Image (spheres, rainbow, N blue to C red):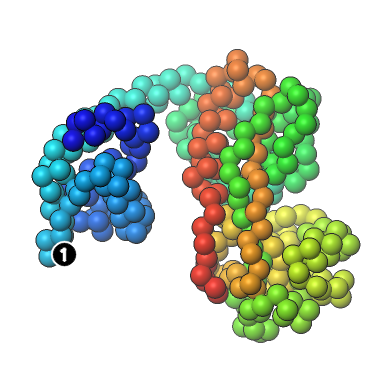
């Protein structure tokens, strides 16, 4: 076991070891999932991934619970040592974070700033109370050169050579409708059903029509009966049951009143770029916020398949 762990040390994932450790200590996947705040399927996949990485079986089933195999018993003290080390790193990082102070302005789209980032801002302030976070909800491209923002989250890579950009993920969007709209008009299953339905617009009709036609949604201006240049206002129109529109899966897959439509429409993929200026190399507070944003967005904006008609 030790030799196997040494051979994979460079790529070893602490999240997998944490899943194993919680399962070993709790005795079941369901209890371990509750402890870690994960779903049981997610935890099961993590344990299975660790077994594949180490080429061993770590648990045997015993009724409704799990018991450690010999390999699992061998791994247990190493996993506990990893937890102790991770806790020491976390405590050290927390002490350093509390010394970070000053203003950081983050700009993101209205929908992202409203529905995806406030929780992270709360975590940042808890870890670094000296930070002063200005979250700007703005769909335009703010000028980082003139310090209108320190960090921007955008879907287009910047061309300016003195900006630093990191590709965080390739997120997805789908066509969504409110459950109230579906109750009145039925749920459109196929792209061919689009001309019989109403849409909510985010931009000028000609721009939106050109984009939707490229996806095979052959509607006309008569189908776009409501619109707003504000992302939040357009989302509110959709949730009020006024029509269908493309929305990012994150955070919209968390809204119980929205359902995906057009089962034969492939998810629209778009890049998520985290952008800042060269002060990243010299400013501890900007580096701290930039890295935390990168980790948060990477973990939350991955493509998650949706069942037809479900969120």
Q: Give the residue drawn at x 87%, y 63%.
A: 205
Rendered image quadrant of residue 152: top right
Residue drawn at (70%, 75%), measured in percent from left and top? 191
Give whichever of 299, 264 is nearer the camera: 264
Position in image of residue 300 (x %, y %): 51, 48
**Along the line of sight, which residue is nearer the eye, 172 or 104?**
172
Give the residue at x 62% y 25%. Answer: 103
| Residue visible at 24% across and 34% down in the picture | 4
* Among the 4 quarters of the image, the one containing residue 276: top right
Residue 174 in the image: above or below residue 5: below
Q: Is residue 23 left or right of residue 268?
A: left
Res 137 visible: no
Identify whether 211 is placed above or below 145: below
* Residue labelled with disc 1: 64
Circle 1 packing at 10 Å, graded few (<14), some (14-19), many (20+), is few
Residue 158 at what x, y percent from top left?
Answer: 75, 34
Furthest residue toward top = 282
Quarter of the figure with the N terminus? top left
Total marks placed: 1
Where residue 223 appears, x then y in whole percent? 82, 75
Taking 294 as reference, is 55 left or right? left
Q: Secondary structure at mark 1?
A: loop
Relative to 260, is 94 above or below? Answer: above
Residue 257 seen in the figure = yes
The x and y percentages for residue 22 are: 23, 46
Q: Compared with residue 86, is residue 217 higher up or lower down, i.e. above or below?
A: below
Q: Is residue 6 left or right of residue 290?
A: left
């Amino acid at each position: 076991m030790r030799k196997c762990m040494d051979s994979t040390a460079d790529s070893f994932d602490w999240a997998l070891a944490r899943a194993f450790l919680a399962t070993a200590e709790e005795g079941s996947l369901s209890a371990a999932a509750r402890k870690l705040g994960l779903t049981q399927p997610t935890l099961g996949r993590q344990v299975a991934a660790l077994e594949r990485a180490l080429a061993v079986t770590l648990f045997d089933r015993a009724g409704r619970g799990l018991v450690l195999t010999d390999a699992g018993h061998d791994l247990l003290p190493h996993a506990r040592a990893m937890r102790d080390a991770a806790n020491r790193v976390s405590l050290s990082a927390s002490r350093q974070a509390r010394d970070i102070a000053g203003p950081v302005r983050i700009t993101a789209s209205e929908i992202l700033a409203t529905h995806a980032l406030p929780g992270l801002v709360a975590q940042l302030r808890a870890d670094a109370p000296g930070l002063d976070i200005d979250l700007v909800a703005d769909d335009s491209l703010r000028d980082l050169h003139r310090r209108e923002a320190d960090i921007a989250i955008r879907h287009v890579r910047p061309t300016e050579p003195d900006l630093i950009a990191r590709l965080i993920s390739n997120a997805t969007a789908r066509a969504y409708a409110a459950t109230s709209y579906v109750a009145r008009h039925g749920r459109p299953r196929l792209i061919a059903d689009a001309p019989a339905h109403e849409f909510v617009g985010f931009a000028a009709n000609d721009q939106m029509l050109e984009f939707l036609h490229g996806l095979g949604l052959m509607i006309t201006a008569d189908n776009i009966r409501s619109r707003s240049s504000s992302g939040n206002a357009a989302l509110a129109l959709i949730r009020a049951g006024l029509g269908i529109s493309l929305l990012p899966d994150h955070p919209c897959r968390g809204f119980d009143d929205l359902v995906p439509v057009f089962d034969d429409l492939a998810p629209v993929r778009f890049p998520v770029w985290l952008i800042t200026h060269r002060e990243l190399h010299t400013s501890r507070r900007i580096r701290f916020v930039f890295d935390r944003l990168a980790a948060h967005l990477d973990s939350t904006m991955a493509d998650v398949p949706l069942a037809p008609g479900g969120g």
